[in-house]
Amino acid sequence: MQSITRLTLMLAAVLFAGIFEGSSAESGPRVTVIRTPEQGIQPQAGVDSRGRLHLIYLSGDPAAADIFYVRRDHDGDDFTPPLRVNSKSGSAIAIGTVRGAHIALGKGDRVHVAWMGSKTAEPRGPLDSTPMLYARLNDEGKAFEPQRNLLQFAAGLDGGGSVAADGLGNVYVAWHAGAGMHGEANRRVWITRSNDDGKTFTREVAASDQRTGACGCCGMRVAADDMNRVYMLYRGAAEEINRDIFLLASEAGGESFRGTRLQDWKINACPMSTASISRNGRGVMLGWETEGQVYYARLDPASGKALPPVSPPGSTGRRKHPAVAANARGETILVWTEGTGWQRGGSVAWQLFDGEGRPLAERGELPGVPVWGLATVAPRPDDGFVIVY
């Protein structure tokens, strides 16, 4: 009787752990869900060559926030003490959820961060315009260098921006703006490049001549790999009602891009959406939202074209802010928020898929996404995933 009781307690403990961490014996890898340190919001994560998790998040006044950086070893439970990224207090924006900071890991696992400046951020852009700010971790890895504005010409920044880096010392910062032209239909995606690991950057140039426009208060993403390829995902605004999702892809280190429409969406409003790009040894994964549903698509490594998009089962019509990641086994996780909106929090949800895009049993939802909050996800060295929200 005593052994039966002990066995029952062990089974109950395993079941409880599975529920808490979103694991499922039949679906394979365990999904671990953790909260952002120090009650921060809008976490963004990256995993380096040693399997360490790097994380940034916003804290403080949503209109004049600070950015903090922490790191955790792949087999550790605790994050390092937070380092403030922005050298000028209150330089970032959390309002709207789309304008926060992005992180990229580059040569030697150096950390690069870029973000849209707040109304009080310095240095300013041309004619006192909103700056596109950038900072990198110093050579000693103990502090961030003073923030710099990279926006030299293409003013009219909104919807934030993004940063990418590769292992060769190339760093890319991108955003969309009208650059003196009025209306969302006249906005374009701009990109500036560094080939010396972020020490210096070129003057920004338009990434494409396609007349797609850009959704003014929608976020975008940029990513890069060590094969000189750069990818950007953004929402268009042609005629200010065509809010289609577009991919810009370059095989020439960002010198020129080829544009592809991935999905249509007609809406005479700004949906305030965000996008996601991640990459691993198996390729590039894209994530986006359309009409309250979230999707992911994998880029075919041979052709570079996006395969048909995949969405989680069901549709609540309230899904936003997707984050996508894949592990070495080819499994993909799609993470999103449910019910979030303007000045409204919600819950975080996730679905795991196999290598063919079929939903696995491992899925879940947890409450507690704060106002202006979203979630991020990263693969673990053991082929599991960690969600931070």
Image (spheres, grey):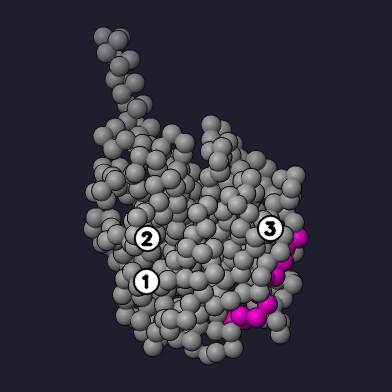
Name above or below for residue 44 compared with residue 155: above
Label 3 element class: loop
Does label 3 or label 1 sit earlier along the sequence?
3
Name above or below for residue 52 compared with residue 134: above
Left or right, 186 with reference to 304:
right
Residue wearing tag 2: 304
Left or right, 323 with reference to 28:
right
Residue at image location 36% in from the left, 66% down from the top: 289
Name above or below for residue 125 compared with residue 333: below
Does label 1 or label 2 sit earlier along the sequence?
1
Work out whether residue 243 or residue 3 is closer to the camera in this orientation and state it: 243
Asked whether residue 148 is drawn in magenta, I would say: yes
Q: Amino acid at mark 1?
A: Thr
Mark 2 neighbour class, 10 Å CA radius: few under 14, some 14 to 19, many 20 or more:
some
Label 2 element class: loop
Query: Which stretch is magenta?
Result: 146-161
Q: Amino acid at mark 3?
A: Asp
Give the numbered dot on residue 201: none
Residue at image location 46% in from the left, 39% down from the top: 380
Does label 2 or label 3 sit earlier along the sequence?
3
Q: CA distance from mark 2 to mark 3?
A: 27 Å
Work out whether residue 113 or residue 88 is closer to the camera in this orientation and state it: 113
Q: Position of residue 86 (x, y in %)?
A: 70, 60
Query: Can I make out residue 370 in this image?
Result: no
Query: Can I make out residue 203 in this image?
Result: yes
Q: Position of residue 379 (x, y in %)?
A: 45, 43
Residue wearing tag 3: 196
Q: Quadrant of residue 65?
A: bottom right
Residue wearing tag 1: 260
